[in-house]
Amino acid sequence: MISFKIFFEQNVNNETVALLPGGFKPPTKGHFEALEDLLQAANKGVVFIGKESRDGITQDQSYQIWSIYSRYLSKPVDVIKSPVTPVKSTYDYAIEHSNYNIIVGAGAKDADITRYNSFIKNPDKYPNVVGIEKINIKGEGISGTETRERILAKDPSVVDYFVPEIVNQTDKDRIKQILGIV
């Protein structure tokens, strides 16, 4: 095992990337706030979106909404459609980007953080993973289930319910179009 001083000297000049994996059907203000919090300790972020649809919300719709949100975040963010699962994409990214320090965001509910135990148990394989951050509920506890129900009901006020307040009206209208609520 190397000393902290050697580790720090080896990694001090590396960029830090915050990874936020999830289904995001759709991405809500809670997801947005969670990523913004993670970005405070990073130079940039990456969002991995699950491929499975939920109640008619698709990966592509989530990608389009995250692409809008990314313009409002404090640091650059890449939005990536996971080909298998967001968890697998997270592990693959850690291996493929060993030149970055990586922080992984994991939800507080359903023991989500345990999906990333291999980072903790295998520090030699993942020396660049410098943190797994447990994300507590954000965004006023917005319910994904309620959001999807309101989208299915074509409730025009749903966008004000789940979209971050910082998003302008033009982009909110675009999100309504993406979700077919117009």
Image: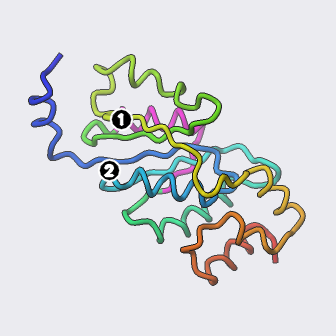
- Dot 1: element: strand
The circle on residue 26 is: none
Q: Is residue 106 above or below residue 138?
A: above
| Residue 83: in magenta span | yes
Residue at coordinates 18% horizontally, 16% vertically from top-left? Answer: 1
Q: In which image quadrant can residue 9 be found? A: top left
Residue 78: x, y in percent?
A: 44, 57
Magenta stretch mostly in which secondary structure?
A: helix
Q: How crowded is mark 1: few (under 14 residues within 10 Å), some or many (20 or more)?
A: some
Task: Give, as a three-letter code, the residue at label 2.
Answer: Ala
**Mark 1 highlights which residue?**
131
| Residue 121: in magenta span | no
- What's drawn in magenta, residue-wise? 79-96
Kindly indicate whether the residue at mark 2 contacts the one at mark 1 (C-beta within 8 angstroms): yes
Q: Nearer the viewer, residue 121 or 52?
A: 121
**In this rendering, position of residue 106 left or right of residue 8:** right
Mark 1 or 2, nearer chain start: 2
Q: How crowded is mark 2: few (under 14 residues within 10 Å), some or many (20 or more)?
A: few
Q: Is residue 95 above or below residue 139?
A: above
**In this rendering, position of residue 73 left or right of residue 131:** right
- Work out which quarter of the rendered image holds the C terminus and state it: bottom right
